[in-house]
């Protein structure tokens, strides 16, 4: 193979064209002209939409950015897009005179795959909409993320009014993309090679570019990266001043060039290196519950922890073949096309989707734990911890985690062991308490809850009241004032707010009542929540204490905003789905998921990151009787396989489990 300078490389393979590659970029001229036909002034963002592999990144970077004369910034969404976007915009120079400022957000769909925080996502999208009022905003969006984008008003409006769809290129455009870069590199293109490439690209495998044939798409959607890689591989196989049909066939052609390149690297590895390569590539893949797999940007320091110098050497081999891209501090697969074009990688992804989803959840939870200064309240419990611990027990899985996520799992397991020892001790103390209160419990035949600080016990039942005891010394429980009254029927459930200052009680009179317990000796009635059309079987506070959930016999769960508990406000419509009485409800530790157990033998899950717009997340099945309490970590292990597919969280209602021991 002839040696050439880097500046003579006419094709970019799987990599996108960058702004400096503009002289080598051909075939997108008509689309660029269409973009400039839009008013590129301020207002709504302009969105370039198309399938993966349609050339969006190259079009915006080499085709559009190169023609801008004013200040321009390029941004790709990160795990914290709002924060990082603000920094990019702050660094954008002021324009001179009437010269506009331009901001391009490439791979906009990454905001849905890389950012796990809905608040960050909403803040970023709002910032994009606001910046569009003072600068020209152009976004590149993968077409298979339309449904996610349409959930946000500013994006929906832009898709309706200011959208350019990037479809397949025509035969003439493909010819330019083949011939013109070679001509610029002073290479000849053998007669017949262009037509052979068009036939291999053509969806109909016939009449590609024939004279008089109607103009139509010259390739399948997403095929451009395969063409570009085949051209690069053909050029690398050439040894003269021309690229030939023989060179193209030697590269494996459009259908096999990527496979041959990837398998060439993989086949040259030792058995241990091949195992490390599998872990490496799966670490660079993001698998979500409601979207196809995508590549993921990972910090280089996280990958080197897999094997130190060995990992860097392995990375280098795939980087040399442009299958993986490394910049200053991140690593990613060069293009999403590789995820489907390399059969071995596709099989790894297909066989390991559950593991990939679990790893993503661990990584996201570890990030939240880190952001909360590693507070123990952000560690997983119950079923979630059981799933994470079982997954982490596999050495291959454990090795794929970065230092932060590995430390997160270890801290969670240690915290659970500490908690179990403390609860065994508390259980022994509470058994003595239960003995002292046996007569009273038999009379009221009700339920109980313990305040977060463990000093107050609330018990309620058929006498329509809630009684309070000081149990700071469980051997000597002391009644706290008179029983709380107000409910007109049996009280079925009680719960303390996370700060212990508010007590909620659900009753068979179809209401939820709130009391202020700032002074437990003189509780003060705050409000009565109405709406359920049946007995209120369960009440639960969110971890923030700002949202209250109530499950009832009318087969629904209702949510209220109780930021001001004296003036509660209903949040959205009742949550429906259960086909029988809802007997229990609880929030995840981060407050973003609500779980409800029903007499239909299912646990129902909702995303309540935005409580007024709660969205169903599926169900957990497997129970053969009413779901009335959250599972312990041990019981949870029996559900782990299905939960790994359907649940992002399931916790343990600690107060109820203590009180009902």
Image (spheres, grey):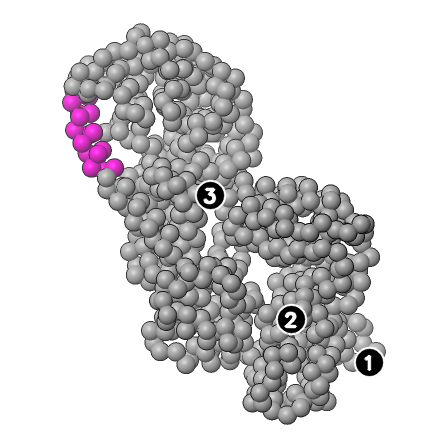
Check disc 2 and report its element: helix, strand or loop: helix
- Residue 481 appears in the figure: yes
The picture places residue 598, in percent across and down from the top left corner, at: 40, 33
The range drawn in magenta is 419-435
N-term mark: 2 or 1: 1
Q: Which mark is residue 211?
A: 1
Q: Secondary structure at mark 3?
A: strand
Q: Residue at x 74, y 76 (%)?
A: 176
Q: Quadrant of residue 120?
A: top right
Q: Please say if 266 is above or below 388.
A: below
Magenta segment, prevailing SS (helix, strand or loop): helix
Of the numbered discs in the image, which one, if any, rests on residue 618? Answer: 3
Density class for disc 2 (Cα within 10 Å; few <14, some 14-19, many ≥20) is many
Q: Position of residue 592 (x, y in %)?
A: 46, 38
**On the rendered structure, is 300 left or right of 73?**
left
User: Is the C terminus in the top left, top right, bottom left or bottom right quadrant?
Assistant: top left
- Residue 46 in sight in this render: no
- Residue 195: which disc? none
The secondary element bearing badge 1 is classed as loop
Task: Name the residue carrying label 2.
Answer: 224
Of 194 and 87, nearer the camera is 87
């Amino acid at each position: 193979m002839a040696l050439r300078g880097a500046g003579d490389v006419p094709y970019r393979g799987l990599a996108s064209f960058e702004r400096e590659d503009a002289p080598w970029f051909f075939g997108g001229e008509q689309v660029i002209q269409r973009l400039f036909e839009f008013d590129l002034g301020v207002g709504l963002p302009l969105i370039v939409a198309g399938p993966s592999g349609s050339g969006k990144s190259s079009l915006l970077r080499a085709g559009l950015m190169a023609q801008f004369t004013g200040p321009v910034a390029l941004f790709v969404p990160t795990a914290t897009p709002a924060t990082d976007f603000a920094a990019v915009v702050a660094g954008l120079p002021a324009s001179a005179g009437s010269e506009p400022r331009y901001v391009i957000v490439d791979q906009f769909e990454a905001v849905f795959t890389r950012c796990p925080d809905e608040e960050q996502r909403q803040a970023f999208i709002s910032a994009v909409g606001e910046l569009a009022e003072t600068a020209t905003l152009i976004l590149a969006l993968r077409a298979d993320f339309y449904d996610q984008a349409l959930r946000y008003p500013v994006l929906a409006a832009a898709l309706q009014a200011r959208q350019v769809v990037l479809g397949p290129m025509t035969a003439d455009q493909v010819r330019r993309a083949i011939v013109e870069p070679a001509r610029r590199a002073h290479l000849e293109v053998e007669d017949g090679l262009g037509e052979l490439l068009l036939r291999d690209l053509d969806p109909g495998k016939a009449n590609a570019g024939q004279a008089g044939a109607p103009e139509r798409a010259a390739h399948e959607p997403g095929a451009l990266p395969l063409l570009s890689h085949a051209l690069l591989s053909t050029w690398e196989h050439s040894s003269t001043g021309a690229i030939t049909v023989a060179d193209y066939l030697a590269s494996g052609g459009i259908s096999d060039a990527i496979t041959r390149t990837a398998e060439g690297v993989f086949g040259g590895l030792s058995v241990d290196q091949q195992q490390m390569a599998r872990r490496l590539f799966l670490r660079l893949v993001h698998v979500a519950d409601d979207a196809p797999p995508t590549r993921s940007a990972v910090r280089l320091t996280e990958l080197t922890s897999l094997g130190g110098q060995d990992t860097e050497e392995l990375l280098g081999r795939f980087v040399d073949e442009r299958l993986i891209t490394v910049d200053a501090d991140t690593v990613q697969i060069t293009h999403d096309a590789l995820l489907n074009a390399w059969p071995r990688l596709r099989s790894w992804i297909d066989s390991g989707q559950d593991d990939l989803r679990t790893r993503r959840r661990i990584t996201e939870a570890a990030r939240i734990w880190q952001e909360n200064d590693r507070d123990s309240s952000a560690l997983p419990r119950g079923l979630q911890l059981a799933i994470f611990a079982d997954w982490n027990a596999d050495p291959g899985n454990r090795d794929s985690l970065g230092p932060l996520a590995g430390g997160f799992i270890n801290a969670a397991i240690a915290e659970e062991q500490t908690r179990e020892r403390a609860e065994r001790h508390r259980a022994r103390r509470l058994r003595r308490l239960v003995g002292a209160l046996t007569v009273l419990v038999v009379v009221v035949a009700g339920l109980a809850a313990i305040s977060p600080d463990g000093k107050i016990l609330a018990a309620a039942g058929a006498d329509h009241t809630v009684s309070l005891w000081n149990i700071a010394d469980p051997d000597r429980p002391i009644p706290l004032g008179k029983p709380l009254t107000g409910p007109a029927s049996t009280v079925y459930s009680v719960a303390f707010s996370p700060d212990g200052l508010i007590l909620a009680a659900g009753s068979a009179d179809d209401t939820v009542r709130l009391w202020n317990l700032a002074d437990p000796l003189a509780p003060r009635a705050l409000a009565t929540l109405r709406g359920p059309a049946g007995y209120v079987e369960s009440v639960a506070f969110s971890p923030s204490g700002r949202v209250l959930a109530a499950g009832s016999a009318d087969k629904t769960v209702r949510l209220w905003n109780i930021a001001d508990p004296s003036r509660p406000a209903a949040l959205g419509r009742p949550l429906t789905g259960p086909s029988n009485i809802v007997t229990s409800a609880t929030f995840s530790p981060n407050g973003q998921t609500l779980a409800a157990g029903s007499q239909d033998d299912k646990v129902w899950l909702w995303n309540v990151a935005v409580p007024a717009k709660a969205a169903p997340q599926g169900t957990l099945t497997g129970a053969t009787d009413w779901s009335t309490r959250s599972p312990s970590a041990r019981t949870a292990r029996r559900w782990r396989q299905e939960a790994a597919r359907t649940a992002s969280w399931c916790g343990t209602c600690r107060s109820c489990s203590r009180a009902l021991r």
